[in-house]
Image (cartoon, coloured by chain):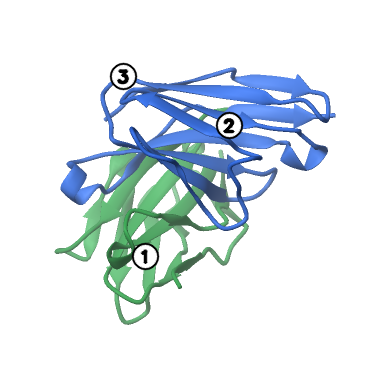
Chain colours: A blue, B green
């Protein structure tokens, strides 16, 4: 299993500002995922971040709003740009378990609880 | 398109009684199925998975789940519930023909009363 930490654990931000969330993994992983969990809802995949390439965004999410960096195999950042109250969510970083040829379950960070006023 | 349904928003059970949390799925190919649990103020934790083989899979904390292909279901079960099992449970599915994207259900909140 992988141990994942996220910073910050929570934040309260003003609309129109940006917040960068950091995700650190205790082992090298090719693939990392960023999810959003809105209040009372399930997880929605924002993007998949592979080291050395551009992140792949899911439908409804764009790079200008959620830029992602992946400078190495243990670290990634997600920025929530020009925030509005609708961006208030828990943001989760995740990595797959198992061998790259057969990734199965995923491991999740503790999440970053964002509130936008 | 792949999808997951958890028909119950909430399940209430008394401690010591058996519990079932329901999940049905829809994928075009062979599914990989998962259950995750989320305790208050904590991230998701992996409970168990079905990839292939025996339809009954056992996981962490005494939980098990049964894969039923004809009913496209993957219900989570435990013979005797504990108060500490109270949490939010997510079923998830991955269609292996569509890469590594995993779809999560809406979640079922389990309350176990002492």
Report which residue position mark 1 lands on: B74
Cα distance between the residues tagged 2 and 1: 24 Å
Q: Chain ID for label 1? A: B
Task: Indicate the position of residue A95 as horizontal and vertical percent values.
Answer: 36, 36
Quarter of the N terminus of chain B within the rendering? bottom left
Return the residue at label 3. Answer: A26
Q: Quadrant of the C terminus of chain B?
A: top right
Task: Give the residue displayed 66% in from the left and 40% down from the top.
Answer: A65
Compared to A21, does A80 lie above or below? below
Residue occupied by mark 2: B40
Would you say B112 lies left or right of B101 here?
Answer: right
The answer to whether the residues at label 1 and label 3 have Cβ atoms under 8 Å apart is no
Q: Which residue is more in the foreground, B14 or B26?
A: B26
Q: Nearer the observer, disc 1 or disc 3?
A: 3
Identify the secondary structure beneath mark 3: loop
Within 10 Å of disc 1 (Cα), the crowding (few <14, some 14-19, many 20+) is: many
Secondary-structure class at tag 2: loop
Is B21 above or below relative to A7?
below
Residue A82 in the image: state x and y as whole percent: 75, 33
Q: Residue at x 48, y 68 (%)?
A: B3
Q: From what the image shows, is residue B3 above or below residue B20?
A: below
Q: CA distance from mark 1 to mark 3?
A: 32 Å
Camera-near label (2 vs 3) is: 3
Q: Do badges 2 and 1 share one subunit?
A: yes
Q: Nearer the viewer, residue A18 or A88?
A: A18
Residue at image x 27%, y 49%? A104
Q: Residue at x 62, y 58 (%)?
A: B9
Work out how far the residue at label 2 is from the one at label 3, CA to CA, in angstroms. Answer: 24 Å
**Which image quarter: residue A117?**
top right
Whether residue A37 is visible to the viewer of this picture, yes or no, is yes
Element type at mark 1: strand
């Amino acid at each position: 299993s992988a141990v994942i930490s996220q910073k910050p654990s929570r934040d309260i931000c003003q609309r129109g500002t940006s917040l960068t969330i950091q995700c650190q993994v205790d082992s090298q992983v090719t693939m990392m995922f960023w999810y959003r969990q809105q209040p009372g809802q399930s997880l929605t995949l924002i993007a998949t971040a592979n080291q050395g390439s551009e992140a792949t965004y899911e439908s409804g999410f764009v790079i200008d709003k959620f830029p992602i960096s992946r400078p190495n195999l243990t670290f990634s950042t997600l920025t929530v740009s020009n925030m509005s109250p609708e961006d208030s969510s828990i943001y989760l970083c995740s990595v797959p378990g198992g061998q790259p040829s057969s990734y199965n379950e995923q491991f999740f960070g503790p999440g970053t609880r964002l509130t936008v006023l | 398109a792949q999808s997951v349904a958890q028909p119950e928003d909430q399940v209430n059970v008394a401690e010591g009684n058996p519990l079932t949390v329901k999940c049905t799925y829809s994928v075009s190919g062979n599914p990989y199925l998962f259950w995750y649990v989320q305790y208050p103020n904590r991230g998701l934790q992996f409970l168990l998975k079905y990839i292939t083989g025996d339809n009954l899979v056992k996981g962490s904390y005494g939980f098990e789940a049964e894969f039923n292909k004809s009913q496209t279901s993957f219900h989570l079960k435990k013979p005797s519930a504990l108060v500490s099992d109270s949490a939010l449970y997510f079923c998830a599915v991955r269609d292996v023909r569509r890469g590594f994207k995993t779809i999560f259900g809406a979640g079922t909140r389990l309350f176990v009363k002492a």
